[in-house]
Amino acid sequence: MPKGDSAPRTPPELGDMSADEFRRHGHELVEWIARYLDGTERYPVLARVAPGDIAKNLPAQAPERGEPFESILEDVDRVLMPGVTHWNHPGFMAYFGISASAPGVFADFLASALNQQAMLWRTSPVSTELEGVALRWLADLIGLPPSFEGVIYDTASVSTLHALATAREVAVPGVRAHGLSGRADVPRLRVYCSDQTHSSIDKGVMLLGLGHDALRKIPTDERFRMRPDVLREAIAEDRAAGWRPIAVVATIGTTSTTSVDPVAAIADVCESETLWLHVDGAYGGVCGMLPEMREHFVGLERADSFVVNPHKWLFTPFDLSAFYCRRMDTLRQAFSLTPEYLRTPDGARNLSDTGVQLGRRFRSLKLWMILRYFGAEGVRARLREHIRLAKTFADWVDAHPDLERLAPVPFSVVCFRANPRGRSMSAADLDAFNDALMHRINASGDVFLSHTKLRGTFAIRVAIGNLRTGEAQLRRVQELVSLGVGTNNP
Amino acid sequence: MPKGDSAPRTPPELGDMSADEFRRHGHELVEWIARYLDGTERYPVLARVAPGDIAKNLPAQAPERGEPFESILEDVDRVLMPGVTHWNHPGFMAYFGISASAPGVFADFLASALNQQAMLWRTSPVSTELEGVALRWLADLIGLPPSFEGVIYDTASVSTLHALATAREVAVPGVRAHGLSGRADVPRLRVYCSDQTHSSIDKGVMLLGLGHDALRKIPTDERFRMRPDVLREAIAEDRAAGWRPIAVVATIGTTSTTSVDPVAAIADVCESETLWLHVDGAYGGVCGMLPEMREHFVGLERADSFVVNPHKWLFTPFDLSAFYCRRMDTLRQAFSLTPEYLRTPDGARNLSDTGVQLGRRFRSLKLWMILRYFGAEGVRARLREHIRLAKTFADWVDAHPDLERLAPVPFSVVCFRANPRGRSMSAADLDAFNDALMHRINASGDVFLSHTKLRGTFAIRVAIGNLRTGEAQLRRVQELVSLGVGTNNP
């Protein structure tokens, strides 16, 4: 961190930092962050430390005396930065590429200073109402009809948990009051998803007391999409065996390959079977904004609930998950409780009724600032650029004689592997070769890729989603891949 | 927001805001926040808007074209600020007084720019390891023995949910795999808390599938403390009736009166009955740092889990809840899942195994910066000052012939009511008189108080916890109360 021009000051005996000191350190921090965001390439994307390296450089106990803020900022550079994996680096293409954009970072700064806690309307009218407005903006852009009401949670795990809790509320009369156990009238419950669905669904059924084996994973087709015919058969089979099916989770943009489940066909099944349909668009959902992508969203309007994470592909600093529900009153019915100390005379709707968390950070501010700063047009242009980059990379893979693409590319993620000509490797050797190739690429420090397994085959993923990622980073991946496939020991 | 000296610029066609523009707006924002934090008294504490007032001043749709950041900041002042209830105002004494201190606000700013996502150790070594270090610092200060391992969640609701989920994991063999329903071997489950316990416990048992009536509320004594003798009887009665008791939640600092349950006596019960003991110190827990408060913490070392919220009384911007558990391996057993796309070769412990949320914001940074900036000594001095202010106010209430104190004051919250001499009001009239008094006080804009009901009696609460709250604000409350009790129509 840059040095200020005044001598370090110890904290005051009582109260907070003085306004003068706040200004001094605030301005230093702005300069530091501006340099950081403009030059993350100075750092290796993936932190080059071993487990324990950061902790061992920190004292075992808190200091007894307060320290000048300068000393703390110096330690950020010296002790903490080596342990940062740079999600905001243009070479970050692992998991899902994401961005903390400037308007989002500013919004978080302001939100922290305002310290809004939107449990009740009156404890933060602005957070409560801006949440409604910004979520409606996003819903309109994505094409969700007004019948969907929105609420912001922290993560998709929590959004999906609320979706499944509401499905349980609908399917099990009296569950809010009487629970699930010790009741002869409640059999084992079943939730369906595909074999490509995110692990948050697994955690959700476990937490809700349905049990992990309540989750039945439906096989996918050759494009990694849930097979509605098998889903229908599974439901019939389960009903015959005494299970009570309650919900299906379909995904628009799965985690491994970004495959898209056939939402309309799944909605048909859910309607005829009277099951809750939750659609997980945590990553892919924002592409509802692109007319050329509408095919992936057909049937979404028939879902009961939907989640999209602006902290994934809408340039929003972590965390902000947008949850939409066509039956939000049922969700509130499952959770609302008003103890006396929270009763208010205004008759307004309180966000703490919409879920398990009482306290809520002022997250809508960043969504609102981002949508205004970039504009709908600007967001679309950025999504299209990421999709274009991914297609370019996929084309390069397809044209390369030593590479195989392992999945379609509906959005901005490419799954591929090396399979060098003229070398007949066993399946296990090929996996090991690709694993080594990926680690060698990551060791460059210039880019960071992650992997998955597709039908048991090791696949390297290139996931584009950072605002600063461009052709330079893709060319670097291509160089590193080409270098690796040319060697026996990548 | 202050105007910059350059002409407004529209966002670039692709990518993020330029570094120059980031600097310009960042510096403006620092000035704005410095002025805000130093002068929140310019605003009424409680927002003076009616439901819908903020939303109606915002466009119904997101802008198609991106806008200069200047325009967005202008709307913060013009449209949003009137809807802010100022939690960071020295006159905020409702619910629990809290503070977003400067080092915490800076930490959030930096954390958003770094955009760490600590699902795996490798995706953020710094966040993963600093979380362990900062939580150990806090545990040592509070006096929690090393057998307690910590993890950071967003809110106490989520911390308590994980405590109860772990209790369920212990008490119901196979619940992770097989759930609760359709099992002849699992009877109705029971959780115990006092009639003063926070509503998050109610939501927890509902979400976990135990049902709301699984929560049995034990009566409290004249000081609003859970009665261990009644607890023991209730457990015996429930066992005889076929319930399976699984956990007790004791509170150090309840929400209404900050009463302290007799943790040691409750721990005796839990040990002899083999029940999980969760201690909710969301507000009061930080006072474990004060030797003169140790009496309230006797027995805490025998708890299975404990929650304390630095975002309540440790000057931390919302949200940061510190959860400690003596059996964290059991918690991980209840939740860990590693899909292929999250497997890593480093063998490190991953935070996403410790709970339901996969993604995690870099929250430990603010706890670390706050403990360093204020130091243990500085934190203790501030807690003691808040406690001193509360005692001063309680003494004033006790000495005032028209006021009644309605609960002991172990920490920094005073519950009282007006009961004017020479007027014999019915219980209902007294409640209405105090309700009106509180609203009149709040209408001043100088302070914000909230209420509770104690054994059916309306009580006004004065809750001190903001770093900037001092004698001036207390005197203002005294003036407003005195003015109110002197009138027939407060």
Image (cartoon, coloured by chain):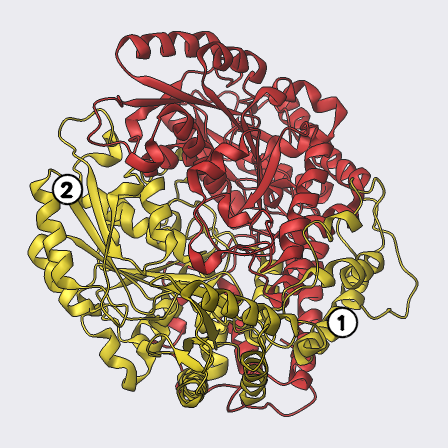
Chain colours: A yellow, B red
Q: Position of residue A128 (x, y in %)?
A: 42, 58
Name above or below for residue B481 compared with residue B41.
Answer: above
Q: Position of residue B299 (x, y in %)?
A: 61, 17
Q: Residue furthest right?
A: A7
Q: Position of residue B392 (x, y in %)?
A: 71, 29
Q: Residue at x 64, y 52 (%)?
A: B100
Residue type indicated by callout 1? His
Q: Which residue is mark 1?
A: A27
Q: Tag 2, which chain?
A: A
Q: Nearer the viewer, mark 2 or mark 1?
A: 2
Q: Position of residue B168 (x, y in %)?
A: 39, 29
Residue A304, quarter of the rendered image: bottom left
Q: Residue at x 70, y 70 (%)?
A: B30
Q: Is residue A385 left or right of residue A107?
A: left
Q: Residue at x 27, y 39 (%)?
A: A210
Name above or below for residue B110 compared with residue A189.
Answer: below
Name above or below for residue B223 compared with residue A72.
Answer: above
Task: For mark 2, give the secondary structure.
Answer: strand
Q: Is residue A345 left or right of residue B186?
A: right
Q: Which residue is mark 2?
A: A244
Q: Is residue B64 left or right of residue A317?
A: left
Q: Out of A334 and A160, give the one closest to the viewer.
A: A160
Task: For mark 1, give the secondary structure.
Answer: helix
Which class describes the residues within 10 Å of circle 1: few (<14), some (14-19), or many (20+)?
many
Q: Tag 1, which chain?
A: A
Q: Out of B386 and A460, give the one closest to the viewer.
A: A460
Cα distance, mark 2 to mark 1? 59 Å
Q: Residue at x 80, y 58 (%)?
A: A75
